[in-house]
Amino acid sequence: MGDIFADDLPALQVVVPLVTAPLCLVLARWWRIVWAMCTLSTWTSLAIAISLLQTVLADGTVSYAMGGWAAPWGIEYRIDTMNAYVALIVTGIASIVLPYAYRSAPLYLQKDRVSLFFALMMLCLTGLLGMTVTGDAFNVFVFLEISSLSMYGLISLGQDRRALTAAFQYLVMGTIGGTFVLLGIGFLYVVTGTLNMADLAQRLPEVTQLRTLHTAFAFLVVGIGLKLAMFPLHLWLPNAYAYAPSAATVFIAATATKVAVYILLRFVFTVIGPDIAYGDLPFGEIAMGLAVLGLLSGSFVAIFQQNIKRMLAYSSVAQIGYILLGISYATVTGVEASLLHLFNHALMKSALFMAMGCFFYRLRSSRLEDFAGIGRIMPWTFAAFVMGGLSLIGVPLTVGFISKWYLVLASLQEGHWILAILILAGSLLAVIYIWRVVEAGWFASPSERAARAREAPLSMLIPLWIIVLANIYFGINTRLTVGVAELAAQALIGGAP
Amino acid sequence: MELAVALPAAASIPIALTGRFPNLRETVTLITALVVFVLVASAVPGVLAGDRPELTLTEFLPGLALQFRLEPLGMIFALVASFLWLITSIYSIGYMRGHDEQHQTRFYVCFALAIASALGVAFAGNMLTLFAAYEVLSISTYPLVTHSGTEEARRAGRLYLGILLGTSIGFQLLAILWTWTVTGTLDFTEGGILAGEIQGPAAAVLLALYVFGIGKAAVMPFHRWLPAAMVAPTPVSALLHAVAVVKAGVFAILKVVIYIFGTDFILQNSASDWLVWFAGATILLASLVAMTKDNLKARLAYSTISQLSYIVLGALLATQASIIGSMMHIAMHAFAKITLFFAAGAVLVAAHKSEISDMAGLGRAMPITFGAFFVASLSIIGLPPLGGMWSKWYLGLGTIESGQWLLLTVLLVSSLLNIAYLLPIPMRAFFGKPKDGTVHTRMREAPASCLVAMIITSLACLVMFFYPEPFYRLATAIAGAQ
């Protein structure tokens, strides 16, 4: 690569996976080559994301004019601390998931379908990264659709036929969400005549047609809310996560909702501005109410699930509640807590879902009753699951604790005592649903399926444990995460795009 | 100091690796325990001379570090825990083998981790480090509590983790965050950090959040986990539920009282006025419940709950004498209670008896075991010439200093109750006759390693009466500094 491409890194961030996707189809007959190529491509993306973050931290915001057309006429890719950080999360998780998918993806797919799976993964990565780095509102919609369409495909590749209905359900809901986002952006275009986010931010204060602006904001929030599974728009999520192929679940659960949160933050704080969102409109109150409902109902429903992947999916709904809660405060600490939880939740959920994938690889089931006694038979996977669970609960020295710390801190600073208590109560609910699995795996005598199982293959265990150790590492050394999240939050609240 | 924490944690790896060779595995455990004790003991003179060595591992949140700091109070706890780990290791070799327990390697690994975290609690330099070590301790002891894997163990484990995590996340973490929000620091500072930051009723609420949030101190109504945890193998009950875990709880309360609130601050704000009654009630109620228990370990568990509240009470009274009494009681009670548990385990291994009513006449077959039990009972009751007298003396002085005559009565009544539920056990064992008339002629004493452990700890109770110096001096180093 060298320095020749250094200036084009923002574009390459999206182009590398985009180019890989069709190549997957060309080489479809040799899925191992496809896999190697995709792995290399995501690692390259990760390297780009790291280098972009370094650049941003050192020199400030990077603006890149696509095709040499200057903003606001051309499409601008604009990278500041926050989206460099989100891109790091997305590519980091992808770089771990792909090696893991080597054994997990071909489990029940036909050989040519395996290549299709990887092609969809690459497209999904393209879409998510595109949404992240672009500085153009319409571009967000385009990449949103790329990532969504590839996700519908990925989910429908699940082993179970229920995967098809899950994918269809998501397709319907996702399309509604996408349309709403498009309508919102359209309204913004009508009142300002521009699609560039920075430009929008500058022109919106002068807009006099406030009703149109408010309508645009409402459409955007609902549309993005569907994508990020904001309560009560989360109904597509449990089935989608539960029936998608293991590797796809890990990737989607860890990244897709995160990018949607990023888009929400971008529109609320950068484009529309907190004055309108929190001042004129009751976004803060609504988000707070929905967040609390989401985190309580998600945790509560999770306790009664018999399918563990569904249980973790409901837990994700609850975790999104935490993220939303931080945003609803509109303070630096609150947004910082949310940004931290983006990173930390990606780590803990991917650890848990990866462990689930390992179990599924041997058991061909993710039902609680088949889990009986699995702790003795797959000790490494089980230990990883327990660590992931502890992180989810928020035990000190794991990333979960860091998130919880900042979130409660943000609540106390705002004087929201009740919310602080509710956040901690949510952790206690997590203890209950995680410990159900731990008890089943640890004490019960092995089920029929478990008795025939053995430890998961090394190529799945190594990525799993890398994530588990990352859960601990970033729980102790928070210089990177807290530092970057703080910078990003200050930049957002300060209003600087 | 860092070695003392890191060593047991690091030793868990060779212990796990040498699992197939029990002798080697136990050697590793014993050597580690010995080295740790020597390390801790060698730090005592320096601390007495006023050294407060500090070690910052990593600053894991801005302004909040994972930090260790040696001070006299932590020294007492660390000394007791590391010494008794050594003794318990000797004991558990005989017990675990004599009892043919399963999964012994897992047992020793978790044990080492638990001790590492207990020492982490002892040396913690700020409240966050203490909290982290406290939680690790809860989790690393869970596999020990549920060791047998039965349905009963499973239910007990649920209660254990449920109460400990529930209180610590629900109350303690909230209290810590509250403290951090108002003061901006969590460092243990002599004289406390809250003065001027919080007043009146709020201080009382915060203190209550700490006291109940530290569920390991088993103040009623959050005491149920302790009797439940008695399904664990006896060495676990002995070390963890008479020393490491429960003492980590009361130790944490003492730390909070002395270094977060500051005793003067508590007295000025009357922050503990109503909390002392919770401690007082726990002392009496737990003693009463203990009298109704026929299962020996259950009786000892309730006795522990009662004795822990002595320490909590002493801390909450916040006078000089009561603080000294509390600190000394950490050590005195630990030695006496571990002896009682050792004896209970010895009876189980040698005679397979767990109910007190079945133990009549056993004393003649197991004189050493019941002799040790007798000595330790006297120490718990607080009679001379045993160490337990000193701590009760200072605790009593503390109640007088603060003019709480009613609480003094509670202490005295409880001592009488101690006599009523502890002394009949050795009496009956020595002088009673078995119900069915069998004579225990073929019964033999417990394995030698168990006996050695019991003899050492019961002698220690005796020695500490005549030579309470080190503990007393460490205790006054704090209380005097107030």
Image: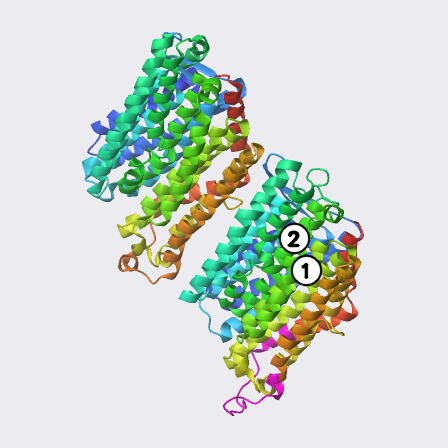
Residue B279 percent across, percent down from the top left: 65, 59
Up/down of B285 relative to A3, above or below: below
Up/down of A335 relative to B239, above or below: above
- In the rendered structure, are the residues bearing label 1 and label 2 in contact, judged by CB atoms less than 8 Å apart? yes
Residue A478 percent across, percent down from the top left: 54, 36
Q: Does the magenta stretch include residue B432?
A: yes
Say whether mark 2 and mark 1 are on the same chain: yes
Secondary element at tag 1: helix
- The residue indicated by pointer 1 is B311
- Please give the name of the residue rendered at 69% of the width and 43% of the height, measured from the top-left corner: B200
Q: Earlier in the sequence, mark 1 or mark 2?
A: 2
Q: 10 Å neighbourhood of mark 1: few (<14), some, or many (≥20)?
A: many
Q: Which of A101 and B353 is in front in this view?
A: B353
Q: Give the spatial CA distance, label 1 vs label 2.
A: 9 Å
Q: Magenta residues, as a range?
A: B428-456
| Horizontal relation, residue B193 to residue B291: left or right | right
Instruction: Give the label on residue B253, or none.
Output: 2
- Please give the name of the residue rendered at 22% of the width and 36% of the height, measured from the top-left corner: A156
Please state the chain letter of the residue tagged with numbered disc 1 in the rendered image: B
Q: In this orientation, does residue B449 appear?
A: no
| Horizontal relation, residue A33 to residue B194: left or right | left
Residue A283 percent across, percent down from the top left: 43, 25
Q: Nearer the viewer, residue B11 or A495?
A: A495
Secondary element at tag 2: helix
Up/down of A29 relative to B43, above or below: above
At label 1, which amino acid type do we have?
Ile
At label 2, which amino acid type do we have?
Ile
Residue A195 percent across, percent down from the top left: 36, 12
| Horizontal relation, residue A230 to residue B142: left or right | left
Q: Is residue A244 magenta?
A: no
